[in-house]
Structure formats: structure tokens, C-alpha cells
Image (spheres, rainbow, N blue to C red):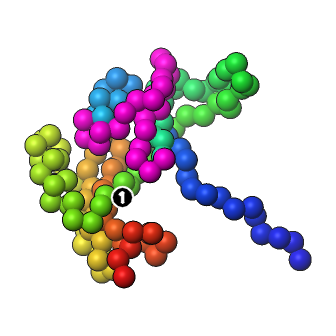
Amino acid sequence: MTPGPPPVARILETALYVADLARSEAFYGQVFGFRTMTGDDRMRALSVPGRGVLLLFQRGGSVEPGTTPFGEIPAHDGHGALHLAFAIPAGSLESWLAHLAAMDILIESRLDWPQGATSVYFRDPDEHSLEIVTPGLWPNDQDRPG
């Protein structure tokens, strides 16, 4: 019998490919409060609470391998509208709705799931689909009620 795969602790990085790094960096800073940890002319690394990292890459800026003093980063790129969901604390949905309204961000959709979670969808400047979701959407959510 072969053993299963070694454990994975969590997703560390998630990447989006954007048309304008400064615009996207400002958007994610203003809407979510994410702070820039590092960056250059092709990418920004934003700190997401809970030890996560949102990487913003200049669209087309990483189609060749990237050389660093530590080694080579393989080429990558992406096109089209992608989706990210951000967990928000229980009880913060109304504050989030007010925050988004104050920023003139259009709510595209709201779903009240049968298991008790609520999802709210909107777009970033590159038309990526963003979701904020209260606890309980997925069975493996450690903040899931009950």
C-alpha cells in the first residue's frame, strides 16, 4: 500500500494578473486594507491577514522566467476574469456593505446560503470577481458556527 501525499498546511499565495499594478495595489489597499510587503515593476506582494499573500502580477510581465539571487522563478501569466473569496468575521457583513457602498463599489450579487453563510460579489478594476463571505460556507471552515 502506498502512503497518501504529505500534508499541506494551507494556501500561502494567490495570484491575480492585472493591467495596472499601481491601480490594483491601491484598490486592494483601500478596499481590504492589504499592505504591500514587497514589489517591483512586474509584481506586488500584499499581506492578507491570517498569513496569506495576494500576489499582483503585471499582465504579461512574467511570461519569461524570473532570475533572482536565489534561483529562477518559472514563467507564468493569466488572462480573463478570475475569482477570489475573502472570509470575513461573523457579524461584520453590514459594516462591509457600508464600506463598499462608501467606496461606490457595485454589488454584483448576494447569496444567503442554506448552511447560514452569506456571500457578496463585486469586481476589482480588472473585472476579477471578488467575494466576501461570512463563516460557514464550506464544511472545512474552522470558523463555521456549530
Quadrant in the rendering for residue 146: bottom left
Task: Say left or right for 94 vs 74.
Answer: left
Please tell me whether residue 71 belongs to the stretch shown in magenta: no
Q: Residue at x 30, y 34 (%)?
A: 29
Label 1 amino acid? Ala
Residue 59 visible, this orientation: no
Q: Residue at x 87, y 72 (%)?
A: 2
**Element at badge 1?**
strand
Residue 98: x %, y % from top left: 12, 51
Q: Is residue 85 above or below residue 73?
A: below
Q: Which residues are magenta?
A: 30-51
Q: Position of residue 47 (x, y in %)?
A: 43, 38
Where does residue 131 sit, x and y in percent of width and height? Answer: 32, 55
Question: Which quadrant holds residue 123?
Answer: top left
Q: Tally the marks.
A: 1
Residue 1, above or below 50: below
- Among the 4 quarters of the image, the one containing residue 126: top left
**For the point 10% across and 43% down, which residue is it?**
102
Left or right of residue 46, residue 112 in this image: left
Residue at 57% x, 26% y: name it: 62
- Quarter of the picture holding the N terminus: bottom right
Q: Viewed as shown, does residue 64 lie left or right of 11?
A: right
Left or right position of 1 against 86: right
Closer-to-camera residue (141/14)? 141
Q: Can you say whether 66 is above or below 11 in the image?
A: above
| Residue 74 point in image, percent of width and height | 68, 32
The residue labelled by disc 1 is 87
Q: Is residue 34 magenta?
A: yes
Within 10 Å of disc 1 (Cα), the crowding (few <14, some 14-19, many 20+) is some
- Residue 145 in sight here: yes
